[in-house]
Image (cartoon, rainbow, N blue to C red):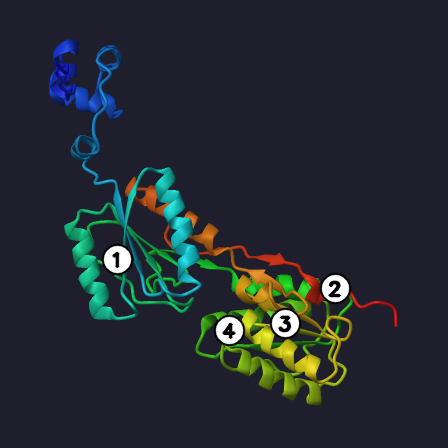
């Protein structure tokens, strides 16, 4: 005959053994200050003696927290949103937080619906992931939980936002090209209505100004596409025949530029060095030659945003837009030119 399974130890059992109330056990186990040291020790000893392990629901009731956070994105299918979400989820996992992911698909009404649903599930906080680095409308006002914005900053300066440092990332690219001996550097990037494109163009200007140099021609703005990279290459190779480097605002643009430059008889990187942006390995690790690229460190950005949400849940808020450093991943496309 099978033995009878023992009853699970409850917080009432701990209270009885320690000779205190259930409320005192709750305060002692959760580190509250208003419990005498000797009482706390008695509670801890009783809990250890009974091998008491409060379940998740009990913990939630004791702390007033659900240990659940919401991740609200408009870019779950995009290559920018996913790394941010992965970084955030890793941080939440380390903090034993459950994560609820909602995709608003860029629709305001759908976003509002998801916010209401997440609040009904009593989440402790929200991370809102943008689909670009353009400022987005704040949703923080009148919400009962803290909100942290990642990749796409809030348009409210009182909110907490984390974005990649696109100006600094572009300066990394220019400094690297200069270090390899390049001096005639052009810039091809995305649409003018993207803040990322404007910021990267500003980084090029600053990087060249540091060295006392001017850019080879005006910045060429266009689409985030390989087609635009090919078109820009046609224009630049005719207008700037002595060009020796190009910094492209995305890996897609860079891949298109390299394709046309090779077709026009330019040796890469001997004649022209090329740098991309995003470190999207579907392209950067497959081009010929392999593409040097600026990595915006989006997983780290998401992880940092999650850590700041933990802090905000504890009442420690750091308002404003915080820029996160990028890094340069050096590959074959920027090897120094050999002796002539």
Side of 73 where 325 appears, left or right: right
Residue 131 placement: quadrant = bottom left
Res. 197 mark: 4
Question: Residue reaching furthest front?
Answer: 1
Label 3 and label 1: CA atoms lie apart by 37 Å
> Which quadrant: the N terminus?
top left
Q: Report the residue at 26% width, 71% height from top.
A: 107
Residue 282 percent location from the top left of the image: 53, 65
In terms of sequence position, does the residue under pointer 2 or pointer 3 come before the other? 3
Label 4 and label 3: CA atoms lie apart by 12 Å
The reply to whether residue 20 is visible in this rendering is yes
Residue at the disc numbered 2? 335
Res. 322 mark: none
> Which quadrant: the C terminus?
bottom right
Under circle 1, the secondary element is loop
The reply to whether residue 221 is visible in this rendering is no
Comparing 18 with 270, the one in front is 270
Side of 255 where 241 appears, left or right: right
Q: Are marks 2 and 1 in contact (CB under 8 Å)?
A: no
Res. 247 mark: 3
Q: Report the residue at 32% width, 37% height from top.
A: 96
Label 2 and label 1: CA atoms lie apart by 47 Å
Kindly report which numbered mark, 4 or 2, lies closer to the viewer in this rendering. Answer: 2
Label 4 and label 2: CA atoms lie apart by 25 Å
Residue 109 percent location from the top left of the image: 20, 69
Residue 8 percent location from the top left of the image: 15, 20
Q: Are marks 2 and 3 in contact (CB under 8 Å)?
A: no
């Amino acid at each position: 005959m099978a033995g009878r399974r023992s009853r699970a130890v409850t917080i009432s059992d701990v209270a009885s053994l320690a000779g205190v109330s259930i409320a005192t056990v709750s305060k002692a186990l959760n580190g509250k200050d208003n419990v005498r040291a000797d009482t706390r020790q008695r509670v801890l000893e009783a809990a250890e003696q009974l091998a008491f392990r409060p379940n998740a629901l009990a913990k939630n009731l004791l702390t007033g927290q659900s240990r659940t956070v919401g991740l609200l994105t408009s870019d779950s299918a995009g290559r920018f949103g996913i790394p941010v979400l992965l970084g955030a989820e890793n941080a939440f996992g380390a903090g034993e937080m459950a994560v609820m992911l909602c995709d608003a698909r860029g629709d305001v009404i759908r976003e509002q619906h998801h916010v209401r649903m997440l609040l009904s599930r009593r989440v402790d906080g929200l991370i809102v992931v943008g689909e670009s680095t353009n400022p987005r409308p704040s949703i923080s006002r009148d919400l009962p939980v803290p909100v942290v914005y990642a990749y796409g900053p809030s348009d409210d300066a009182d909110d907490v936002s984390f974005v990649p440092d696109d100006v600094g990332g572009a300066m990394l690219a220019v400094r690297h090209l200069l270090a390899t001996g390049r001096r005639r550097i052009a810039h091809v990037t995305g649409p003018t209505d993207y803040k990322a494109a404007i910021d990267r163009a500003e980084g090029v200007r600053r990087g060249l100004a540091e060295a006392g140099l001017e850019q080879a021609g005006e910045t060429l703005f266009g689409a985030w596409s390989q087609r635009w990279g090919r078109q820009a290459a046609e224009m630049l190779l005719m207008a700037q025949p002595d060009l020796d480097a190009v910094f492209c605002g995305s890996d897609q643009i860079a891949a298109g530029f390299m394709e046309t430059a090779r077709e026009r008889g330019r040796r890469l990187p001997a004649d022209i060095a090329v740098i991309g942006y995003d470190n999207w390995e579907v392209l950067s690790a497959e081009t010929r030659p392999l593409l040097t690229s600026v990595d915006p460190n989006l997983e780290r950005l998401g992880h940092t945003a999650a850590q700041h949400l933990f802090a905000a849940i504890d009442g420690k808020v750091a308002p404003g837009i915080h820029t996160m450093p990028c890094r340069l991943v050096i590959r074959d496309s920027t090897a120094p030119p050999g002796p002539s």
